[in-house]
Image (cartoon, rainbow, N blue to C red):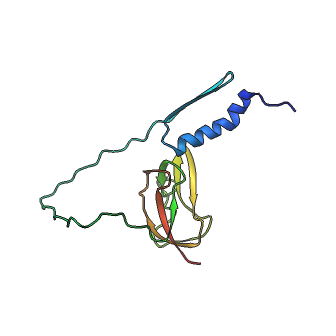
Amino acid sequence: MSEQTPEQNLLTEDVRELLRLITQTDITELSLERGDAKIHVKRTPYAVAAPVVVTSGVAATPVAANVAETPAAPIGQPITSPMVGTFYASPSPKDPPYVKVGDEVHPGDVVGIVEAMKMMNEIESEIHGRVAAIHVENNQPVEYGQVLISIVPLD
């Protein structure tokens, strides 16, 4: 059995590591050279729509200055995104969502998909419980560690 050259090693292990780094960080471009082997990986950033301002004829009610705005804490155990990508609630646009609020889930049940670099990554429940909240919309860009779904344990 012959030993792999540095160039062959680059094309196996390092490519996987480069792809992992670029999908799990905010790095958008990366180049690596080892011997005669060269690789250049570039990720195009997701387009984010500009916020839409909606005005109505009703005047806004002032909020008390001493009220601190904090996001509501997730109820139950959160399921977070393992990577930056796009969340999909169903396997295809015509299919029903994997889960809805109130559904019972078991360990290994698919609760959504995060697409990253044209790869569909199934997001699974790790516990037996009931879906308490779905924090993201279908086809929404998500960040690494962002809470996708909250599950209240049943066991």
Q: In this view, does 106 lie to the left or right of 2?
A: left
Q: Outermost residue, right direction?
A: 1
Q: In this view, does 97 lie to the left or right of 19?
A: left
Query: Observer-nearest residue: 51 or 29?
Result: 29
Name which residue lies at 59% across and 78% down.
Answer: 155
> How many numbered marks appear?
0
Q: Outermost residue, top direction?
A: 36
- Is residue 87 visible in the rendered image? The answer is yes
Name which residue lies at 22% across and 51% down.
Answer: 53
Name which residue lies at 50% across and 38% down.
Answer: 27
- Is residue 117 visible in the rendered image? The answer is no
Query: Observer-nearest residue: 134 or 80?
Result: 80
Q: Quadrant of residue 8?
A: top right
Q: Outermost residue, front direction?
A: 66
Q: Is residue 118 above or below residue 151?
A: above
Q: Position of residue 6 (x, y in %)?
A: 73, 28
Q: Is residue 84 above or below residue 68?
A: above
Name which residue lies at 47% across and 60% down.
Answer: 148
In which quadrant of the rendered image does the N terminus lie?
top right
Q: In this view, does 35 lie to the left or right of 152?
A: right
Q: Position of residue 106 (x, y in %)?
A: 60, 70
Q: Position of residue 129 (x, y in %)?
A: 55, 73
Q: In this view, does 138 lie above or below 78?
A: above
Q: Where is residue 47 in the image (x, y as percent from the top left)?
A: 39, 41
